Amino acid sequence: MCYAIPGRIESIENKTVVVDYFGEKKKAYNELDGLAIGDYIYAQGGYAIQKIPEDEAKSILAVWRETFFELQEVDLKLSRLDLNQQSVPAGFLKVLDKAAEGRKLTKDELLLLMKGKSQPALKLLFKTANFLRQKHHKNSCCVHGIIEISNDCRANCGYCGIAAGNQNINRYRLSGEQILEAARQAIEIHGFKALVLQSAEDSGYDIKELAEIIRKIKANWPALIFISFGEVGLDNLRILYDAGARGLLLRFETSNPQLYREVTAGKELTSRIAHLKRAYQLGYLVITGGLIGLPGQTEEDLLNDILLTKELHAEMYSFGPFIPHPQTPLAGYPSASVETVLKVSAISRIVDAANAKILVTTALETLDPAARREALLSGANSVMLNVTPLEYRPFYNIYPARAHETESIETQISDTIGLLMSLGRSPTDLSV
Ligand code: SAM
């Protein structure tokens, strides 16, 4: 099973190719040598990442052809919207009506949605987000893999179980060979087309070593590579880009500078934001967002987080619930609620309807396994599967009892595909 379907190149202009997927045309940036009209390729995140032989492409497409349209039908049915709801307060309804029409909401209107409490109102908010997701992105859902390569951290964020201050965990750092093998398995055996390499802020890796690993992955197994190593330094972002990384996953955690300082033991938000801005300038696809439910965080803070994510040109929104870890300074605070996470997902979709890919996080699934489905029906259209070697996963315990910690990759894939199909979603990455 692949996580993207091949498309046929219809036209080429400089570095841009137009690709046909069962009649839908999408643009992709081409960094491959020797592509010609009529070739079949895989594209991810707007990049052409691999040319594949015509026979192979045609046999994959033959399998997909019927399913592709059947799934779109199911999705369309599930995303119908009826705004004639007596039980929803008139003011709330008016704002949703405006959102559904694609008109830009004011900050006050967005805040009204964020402060919504009644169940019928929230249900309709989630449905509106799902309607907009379907309208702009059809039924495509990104499925990325993530390898957690190290939990050895120099930072001391107060929420995080692998922070330097926690003396009670076993630290690990995968070697270059182990990372390459994990990447090979994810891409070659399991079919991932987009892979995130994530680590704690680990001084134990040299930047040249990380660049070399990325270079080797790109040379051997075509995929879109995202890095998530924390604040590596602005110049190092370029080194990793030149090595072939094309995406950066870096949450700003909270857009409130004072709250950021408090929960990160005095770090400055400006530094994190500078990384995100430089990454965008360099050409990285940006995945960012924040933690929902930090102590003292307000609803307005959360709305500002969403607006900042848009301002940073995020390709993908990554917002997950704070879950307390017993060996951290924030141990005594409660987790965010599933409802608040779904609200953030839905309002993100309304704010950035046509562009945003919105991730369902593992942390949300940890709060409630059923929430993955709910989030996919509340504006989200992306999931990440943990392809870290099983023996290391328990050590990356940023919060306790992480979902999928003991599940094989095969199980995660089959469960995910099953869920996506039941919702009429295609595990593809076609939005460009
Ligand atoms: N070092 C990289 C960085 O700084 O972005 C990536 C690793 S960091 C552990 C990945 C993410 O874990 C953080 O951006 C944070 O939002 C999330 N995280 C850490 N502790 C958490 C907790 N207790 N609950 C939920 N998410 C948490």
Image: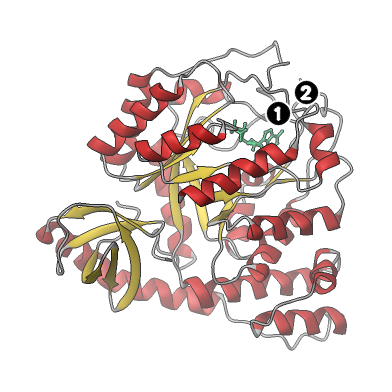
Q: Which mark is residue 328?
A: 2
Q: Are marks 1 and 2 in contact (CB under 8 Å)?
A: yes
Q: Which residue is located at x 58 percent, y 81 percent? A: 80
42 is higher (above) or lower (below) than 14: above
Left or right: 58 as drawn, with respect to 432: left
Q: Which residue is located at x 86 percent, y 64 percent? A: 115
Q: Residue furthest front?
A: 235
Q: Quadrant of ligand 1?
A: top right
Q: Residue furthest right?
A: 296
Please state which of residues 29 and 192 is positioned toward the viewer in this rendering. Answer: 29
Q: Residue furthest bottom?
A: 84
Q: Which mark is residue 160?
A: 1
Residue 38, how many percent across, how many down?
14, 69
Q: Secondary structure at mark 1?
A: loop
Q: Is mark 2 within 8 Å of ligand 1?
A: yes
Q: Secondary structure at mark 2?
A: loop
Quarter containing the C terminus: bottom left
Left or right: 297 as drawn, with respect to 164: right
Q: Is mark 1 within 8 Å of ligand 1?
A: yes
Q: Which residue is located at x 43 percent, y 55 percent? A: 418
Residue 336, how many percent across, how many down?
78, 45
Q: As shown in the figure, which amino acid type bears the numbered disc 2?
A: Thr
Left or right: 359 as drawn, with respect to 114: left
Task: Place residue 230 in its image quadrant.
Answer: top right
Please state which of residues 221 and 235 is positioned toward the viewer in this rendering. Answer: 235
Please state which of residues 10 and 101 is positioned toward the viewer in this rendering. Answer: 10
Task: Place residue 174 in its image quadrant.
Answer: top left
16 is higher (above) or lower (below) than 339: below
Please state which of residues 307 and 126 is positioned toward the viewer in this rendering. Answer: 307
Residue 78, how many percent across, how many down?
55, 75
